[in-house]
Image (cartoon, grey):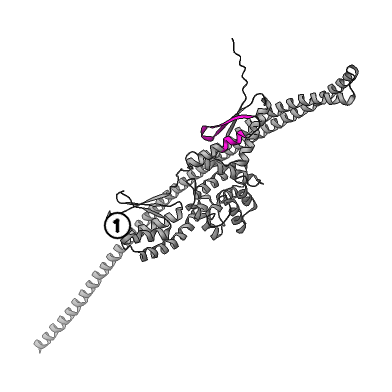
Amino acid sequence: MSGIGFSILLVIIGLATGVGATFVGNRLKENNASSKVDKMLNQAKKDAEKIKRDAILEQKEEQHRLKMELDKEIKEKKEEIKESEARLLQRESNMDKRDEMYQKRELALDEREAKLTDGLNEIQNEKSKVEEIKKEQLDLLEKISGFSKDKARELVMKQVKENMTKEISEYIREQENEAKLVADKTAKEMIVMSMQKYAADIASDQTVTVVELPNEEMKGRIIGREGRNIRTIEAITGVDLIIDDTPEAVVLSSFDPLRREIAYVTLQTLIKDGRIHPTRIEELYDKVCKDMKQKIIEFGQEATFELGLTKFDPELIETIGKLHFRTSYGQNALQHSIEVGHLSGLLAAELGENVALAKRAGLLHDIGKAIDHEVEGSHVEIGVDIAKKYKEDEVVINAIASHHGDTKADSVIAVIVAIADALSASRPGARNDSLENYIKRLTQLEEVGNNIEGVEKAFAVQAGRELRVIVKPEEVDDLGAHKIARDVKEKIEETMKYPGTIKITVVRETRAQEEAK
């Protein structure tokens, strides 16, 4: 029994020991887990603190970067504002100078008006003196000569009339010379200033176009069997094809630039396509004609855009574009119209007129040339009808009608357009003139001078820019020479059309000749 009890006791002790060891092991595990958790929490707190510090640092760096960018942008804006202020100050200074110039002009005009007024007063005083002298002479003649009062009055009036005619002619000549000097100087300043602001390239249009060929074989294909291809091209395009010994080239000749351009595009397309026969030529010609209409509209739109003009009827835009394919003495009509528009705008700005209206009148002044080959009448009459059709301003209509002097100019803008038209046409190289027209103009110029009474001979010199008139000294006096110069000028302006200006010089020479024997 004692052995069994002891075994049981050992078992109990073993169980107790196992339970205690298990409990102690579990406690140790729990303590280890708790310490690990604490370590992980501490590490997490440290990582969180580090992330927080990094985030704060990044935020501060970002704020600093944004601040630097903002400061840079503010600095750039300040620089732009300073530049704008400088430009505004410069513009204001220019406006002040212009105002000062206008004030000087007004003072000059006031002085001129005062001089004219003084001159008229002097004439009135001279007239009063003449009346007194006339009265004294009448009384004296009645006493001495015994003439009747009416006869004496007739004699004195004739003498006074001769004296006054000479004095008035001399005064008019002096005033005209003075007025011409002032007017010419002012006009030249304005025209030169406008021409300096606008300078366009000069390029005369030719009546031929050269088409380059890839090889000599292409000439034979263009001619076709028995010449059927070349005959078809010339028949439907209205353009002459010149095929000579020039290597790899064909020349298109026509005085109509639109026909020549259509033929050029058609021939280029045929060469690229390779299929050259009458049916294909007609198909491509029809297609090119349709495409050319859109191209004409683009030319018209580009012209209005260049001048900064708006509110044009689409049909009028197309008519403007057609001017690109019209020429006058080799000068492209559309480029000429654009140039006249620019010059008109600049002159209008100098005179304080409506710039946009002046540009519009300048652009449309030759609009009749776009269809003058389709409608009967001069390009001026056709242009007026077109302007009325599209309800253009009366100023524009009058500018079109008067730019060649056919109608009186009713506005300053109409005169400006005429001046701009003459400037554009008379620039050296702007227009070509044929020898026949040149000789005809010189002959007509000399005839105008020779048909004036008292003229011995007239000579056109300086390529028609000057007419020298030699008068008969026994029939024409010095004052009469000035009258002949004025009569010749008016006759030339009425009967002739010419580019630029013509100077008239009247020469009166008296020769005394004797022969010693």
In which quadrant of the rendered image does the N terminus lie? bottom left
Count every numbered label the image shows and give the total. Answer: 1
Is residue 52 visible to the viewer in this orientation of the structure?
no
Determine the residue positioned at 60% across, 50% down: 400
Q: Position of residue 295 (x, y in %)?
A: 45, 58
250 lies above or below 79: below
Identify the magenta region: 444-467
Left or right, residue 80 beside residue 389? left
Is residue 22 visible to the viewer in this orientation of the structure?
yes
Q: Position of residue 513 (x, y in %)?
A: 61, 16
Q: Position of residue 234 (x, y in %)?
A: 40, 58
Q: Secondary structure at mark 1?
A: helix
Left or right, residue 153 beside residue 82? right
Residue at which label 1 appears: 220
Q: Is residue 300 magenta?
A: no
350 lies above or below 58: above
Determine the residue positioned at 54% across, 37% down: 442
Front in this rendered view, residue 509 or 60: 509
Determine the residue positioned at 62% across, 52% down: 397
357 lies above or below 25: above
Q: Quadrant location of residue 138?
A: top right
In which quadrant of the rendered image does the C terminus lie? top right
177 lies above or below 6: above
Q: Is residue 464 magenta?
A: yes
Circle 1: residue type? Gly
Front in this rendered view, residue 251 or 469: 469
Front in this rendered view, residue 317 or 425: 425
